[in-house]
Image: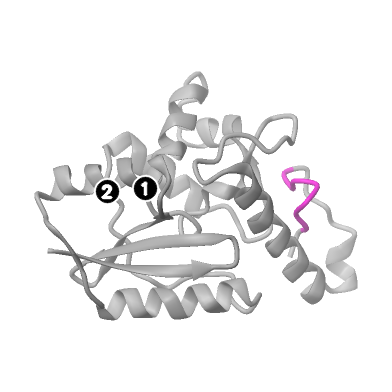
Amino acid sequence: MVYIQYYNSPCGELILASTGDELCLCDWNGLPCADRNMRRIGRYMHADFCVAPSAVLEKTKRQLDEYFAGKRKLFDIQLHPVGTDFQRRVWSALSDIPYGETRSYMEIATRIGHARGVRAVAQAIGANGIGILIPCHRVIGSNSSLTGFAGGLDKKEYLLELERKTCNQIASPTHEHRRSRNLHPAAKEC
């Protein structure tokens, strides 16, 4: 059984799903990406969905509250990403992008040893079903443009701006001058 709950974020409603004590979905409710990801979860796990609370869903909601309030940079939720081995490798690389920083699709492809497969990496990123916690919003174009976000570029911009503002609030003078080449103009190093 996969348990589902909904979360009203400042930039749109999220659908959350858990199996056992792991989160398997955090996606933008009502959008095609969430529908595709739910079908994939059902297919891979041979599971039915039930709208009901679970401990991990409640913990996820609390941590999302903290994230959107600018009080949380890292999540400590057990994740159960559902996808191919290649997709999980890409998603693992996304999890290594620090809060407030960005990486290009090319950098992610190179990191996983698939430098010529930027399009395949972009497709895997687009299939990420655990958004925000696996921070696909931190991936940008090589020219620093905001590109490709299944939830919509307005949400991607909102999340990057939230992280930038939070970093600005806590940045010390010694960190202010160390701007990484990997930062999106809307992001700031923390």
78 and 68: which one is in front? 68
Colour basis: one colour
Dot 1: within a 10 Å radius of its alpha carbon, few (fewer than 14), some, or many (20 or more) residues?
many
Query: How many circles with numbers are drawn on the protein?
Result: 2
- By secondary structure, the bulk of the magenta-drawn segment is best described as loop
Would residue 85 be found to the left or right of residue 98 on screen?
left
Q: Helix, strand, or loop for circle 1?
A: helix
Q: Position of residue 95 (x, y in %)?
A: 48, 54
Relative height, residue 136 to residue 13 (above, below): above
Image quadrant assignment for residue 147: top right
- Residue occupying image coordinates x 68% and y 50%: 157
Q: Position of residue 127 (x, y in %)?
A: 39, 39
Where does label 1 land, which residue?
Answer: 34
Say if the magenta span includes residue 187.
Answer: yes
Q: Residue at x 57, y 43 (%)?
A: 152
Picture coordinates of residue 135, whole percent (x, y): 52, 53
Q: CA distance from mark 1 to mark 2?
A: 6 Å
Q: Given the image, on which type of amino acid does mark 1 rest?
A: Ala
Disc 1 and disc 2 in contact, CB within 8 angstroms:
yes
183 or 111, nearer to the observer: 183
Quarter of the rendering containing residue 36: top left
Quadrant into which the N terminus falls? bottom left
Is 128 situated above or below 7? Answer: above
Quarter of the image for residue 188 reads: bottom right
Please report the residue visible at 27 percent of the width from the left and 48 percent of the height from the top: 38
Q: Which mark is residue 38?
A: 2
Residue 9 tag number? none
Residue range corresponding to the magenta coloring: 182-188
- In the depicted view, which residue is nearer to us: 80 or 177? 80
Residue at left offset 30%, top offset 75%: 56
Amino acid on which the number 2 mark rests in the picture: Met
